[in-house]
Image (cartoon, helix red, strand yellow):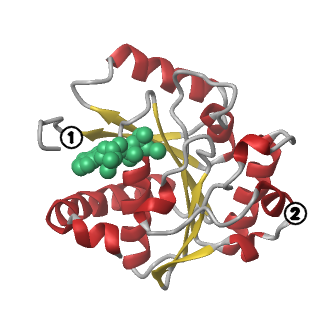
Amino acid sequence: MPYFEKRQRQTLEQIAEVKRILGATEHAMGSKIPTSLLVTSASPGEGKSLFAAVLATAAANSGKFRVAAIDLNWHRPALHQFFDLELNHSSTELLAGDLSTLMCSSGQDALDILTAPADYSDLNTPAFPVAKRLVEQAAAAYDLVIIDSAAVFPTNRMMMDPVMLSGIADGVVMLVLTAVTPKQQVRKAQKIMETAGATILGVIANQLRMSADS
Ligand SMILES: Nc1ncnc2c1ncn2[C@@H]1O[C@H](COP(=O)(O)OP(=O)(O)O)[C@@H](O)[C@H]1O
Ligand SMILES: [Mg+2]
């Protein structure tokens, strides 16, 4: 997997931590299967897409799950980059297509990826029902569905609302860039999602330090 090879040392450390998170998530979900997990955060750039990619990889490597990682941040797609994939389907294909024809191989047997559509801005149909159908189809076909989504703030009419998505996922994991995102904003995002029916399984502290060479 090229992305992970490039950043091997850093990523190995992350994967060790992510395995612990995966264990805690399994524990939190109990025996409830299928499981869909939404990865979100209060603000953009907190590490959602990276975490979704690493969690999906760790879950597939565990040998316990067939995993689907789904990019529902159609306004700012990113998940495909971690697996060296292109945005190779259109909105029309996404609307009409069956999930099995849309999933791409990650290069790892137990992990498939659904990338965002290449032309999201041209989608004239409300996106949420499409996303809901895709998550339902993925939950029926895979053991674990990991959803990469947009940030809760700032709201943007172009984005797929993670608050609505939080209500359809079995659990929500929130990334927080420590020492960057104000606690109040994190609490506000949590509260909004809980009101929408989300089960927040945990908050992940991303201690990425912004340095001149990063
Ligand atoms: N813990 C980390 N270690 C190294 N790089 C990180 C870490 N967290 C995030 N990044 C990098 O920071 C950038 C933003 O992360 P990303 O996952 O795209 O954020 P989001 O999806 O929340 O907008 C990416 O380039 C990502 O690779
Ligand atoms: Mg992202």
Q: Quadrant of the C terminus?
A: top left
Is 39 positioned to the left or the right of 10 in the image? Answer: right
Residue plotted at (43% across, 32% down) = 44
Q: x, y percentage for residue 190? A: 49, 26
Q: Is residue 189 above or below residue 92?
A: above
Is 102 positioned to the left or the right of 11 in the image? Answer: right
Tag on residue 208? 1
Amino acid under label 1?
A: Leu
Quadrant of residue 199 within the rendered picture? top right
Q: Nearer the viewer, mark 2 or mark 1?
A: 2
- SS of the residue under disc 1: loop
Total number of numbered labels?
2
Neighbor class of circle 2 (other Cα within 10 Å; few <14, some 14-19, many 20+) is few
Is 131 positioned to the left or the right of 163 in the image? Answer: right
Amino acid under label 2?
A: Ala
Residue plotted at (74% across, 50% down) = 131
Quadrant of residue 94 within the rendered picture? bottom right
Instruction: Work out whether residue 212 or residue 170 is closer to the camera in this orientation and state it.
Output: 212
Instruction: Work out whether residue 81 or residue 167 is closer to the camera in this orientation and state it.
Output: 81
Residue plotted at (62% across, 39% down) = 166
**Which of pointers 2 and 1 lies earlier in the amino acid sequence?**
2
Q: x, y percentage for residue 73? A: 58, 45
- SS of the residue under disc 2: helix
Q: x, y percentage for residue 38? A: 54, 47
Residue plotted at (58% across, 29% down) = 193
Q: Quadrant of the N terminus?
A: bottom left
Q: Is mark 2 within 8 Å of ligand 2?
A: no
The answer for how far apart the CA atoms under marks 2 and 1 are is 40 Å
Which residue in the protein does label 2 denote? Answer: 96
Q: Is mark 1 within 8 Å of ligand 1?
A: yes
